[in-house]
Amino acid sequence: MSGRRVSLWIGGGVALVAAVIVVYLRSDAYCETDSNCRQLLQLEQVVLLYRLETGALPSDLKDLLNPQRDFDGPYLKRESMLFDKWGRPISYSRADNSSGEFRLIIRASGDRVGNTGPPADIVRQYP
């Protein structure tokens, strides 16, 4: 095998490994081992239950704490579920259309004083 072919094989192998790691970090399997991701997965399930029962996504995560007219609730019993383990609010956004898309994010520590938080954003996006 020529040197060029070997380098193509190595480069392709590295790209494949990187792709597998990215897919794993965005998977539910990763959430089983990471408490931050697990919290977002649980919150995602609560948002989906809210949508199933009310027919709409919550406009704000605090809606999950309040009973909705003619529906079960509250969907969360503890306000602490709306904060990451560093005490910062979990970011929630939803699509402006009726697609049902939403995103939950625990923000990275970045340039914050004390560097509290994960080294990178932890994101759960549905669907």
Image: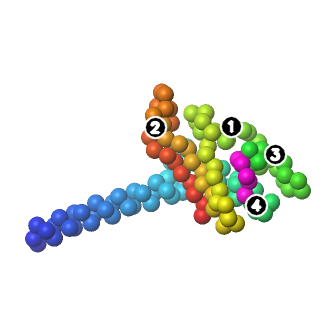
**Horizontal and vertical percent position of residue 106:** 56, 44
Residue 39: numbered disc = none
Q: Secondary structure at mark 3?
A: loop
**Residue bearing the label numbered 3:** 66
**Residue bearing the label numbered 1:** 80
**In the image, which is nearer the foreground, mark 2 or mark 3?**
2
Q: Quadrant of the N terminus?
A: bottom left
60 part of magenta stretch: yes
**In the image, which is nearer the foreground, mark 2 or mark 1?**
2
In the orientation shown, which residue stands out farthest toward the front? 96
> Mark 2 Cα within 10 Å, few/some/many (few <14, many 20+)?
some
**Horizontal and vertical percent position of residue 104:** 60, 51
Residue 110: numbered disc = 2
Q: Quadrant of the C terminus?
A: bottom right
Q: Nearer the viewer, residue 41 or 67?
A: 67
Q: Amino acid at mark 2?
A: Gly
Q: CA distance from mark 4 to mark 1?
A: 23 Å
Q: Secondary structure at mark 1?
A: helix
**Horizontal and vertical percent position of residue 19:** 38, 61
Q: Earlier in the sequence, mark 3 or mark 1?
A: 3
